[in-house]
Image: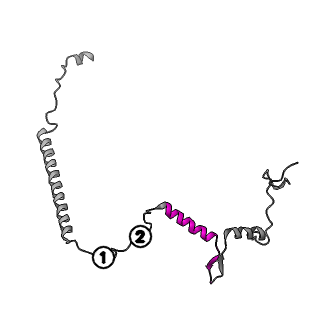
Amino acid sequence: MSAEHADHQPATIHHETKDANIGGVFVFGATLLAVGVVIHVLVWLLFRYFDAETARGLVPQYPMAISREQEPPPEPRLQTNPREDLREMRASEDALLATYGWVDRNAGVVRIPIDRAMTLAIDRGLPARQGVPPPAAVTESGDANSGRQLGEVKK
């Protein structure tokens, strides 16, 4: 079998001559570049035209746009002094927490200072549902049945 192959001469290797037309590639690239330049010039001229119309006042004014010229933008707006805004907000919250006032006069709902509300909650206790036994006292070990209350010192 090796004798059969020995008779054959290796073929000479050549490059393929029909791969790509170099002239056509350069023509396509030059055409693409020229079209890109023409498009950029046309867009530049269009923007110059729009600038000239705006300067002459030829831009149409829509009725809704005219009526909203003096209206401030919708919330949330940019803060010019956020530290001062935060200080004012906290001051108004503190004023609400430290004063008496009506929340809803028709329903008879009032606002009382937070210190007074905490004192009343301690004196009167918090409201509980009827018929539900109170939870067992929590101890240091976390066991409700150990008998030693939280904070109680063992002797």
Does the segment drawn in magenta span residue 91? yes
Prevailing secondary structure class for the magenta stretch in the rendered image: helix
Colouring rule applied to residues: one colour
Residue at 39% across / 71% down in the picture?
Answer: 72
State which quadrant residue 96 falls in.
bottom right
State which quadrant residue 104 falls in.
bottom right
Residue 74's label in the rendered image is: 2
Please tell me which residue lies in front, 58 or 92.
Answer: 92
Badge 1 crowding class, 10 Å Cα cut-off, few under 14, some 14 to 19, many 20 or more, is few
Residue 140 horizontal/vertical position (percent): 79, 51
Up/down of 118 relative to 138, above or below: below
| Image position of 108 (left or right of 67) | right
Residue 35 horizontal/vertical position (percent): 15, 52
Please tell me which residue lies in front, 113 or 141.
Answer: 113
| Image position of 58 (left or right of 108) | left
Q: Secondary structure at mark 1?
A: helix
